[in-house]
Amino acid sequence: MHQYIKQATLSVCAKCGKPVRSHTMCWNCGFYKSREVVNVLGKLAKKEKKKREKEIAAQGKESGAEKPLTAEELSKKV
């Protein structure tokens, strides 16, 4: 008997950037299709909640660090 099992395909969560299976909500942030489905922070204990908020803030800073260049900056690069 031959059973063929494919490896699960993962995509990236638009909110937090963690790998997520297709058509499922992100267990890290609770979002699905850019909408909050589950309030993940509401279910955590106080210490865990603070830790998770710090992680989310750090990820937001990393993704927001790259700002678009102005016309003057683009002309200087050339």
Image (spheres, rainbow, N blue to C red):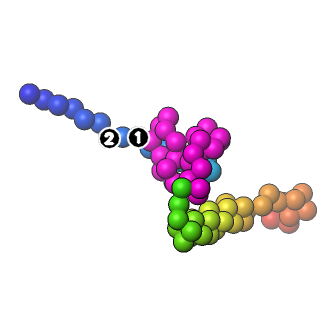
Q: Amino acid at mark 2?
A: Gln
Give the main secondary structure of the magenta stretch. Answer: loop
The disc labelled 1 sits on which kind of residue? Thr
For the residue labelled by badge 1, is the local secondary structure a helix, a strand or a loop? loop
- Find residue 17 and report its horizontal and vertical position in percent: 56, 54
20 within the magenta span: yes
Residue plotted at (53% across, 65% down): 45
Q: Position of residue 59 (x, y in %)?
A: 62, 63
Badge 2: few (under 14), some or many (20 or more) residues near its Cα, within 10 Å? Answer: few
Residue 17 in view in this figure = no
Residue furthest to the top in view is 1
- Where disc 2 sits, the SS reads loop
Q: Answer whether residue 74 is magenta in the image.
A: no
Q: Is residue 77 visible?
A: yes
Q: Specify the segment rendered in magenta.
A: 18-42
Residue holding disc 2: 7
Residue placed under numbered mark 1 in the picture: 9
The location of residue 7, given as percent across then percent down, is 32, 41
Residue at the image position 59 percent from the left and 56 percent from the top: 42
- The N terminus lies in quadrant: top left
Marks 1 and 2, how far apart in space? 6 Å
Tell me if residue 38 comes above or below residue 71 in the rendering.
above
What's the residue at 47%, 46% (across, down)? Answer: 20
Residue 38 is drawn in which quadrant? top right
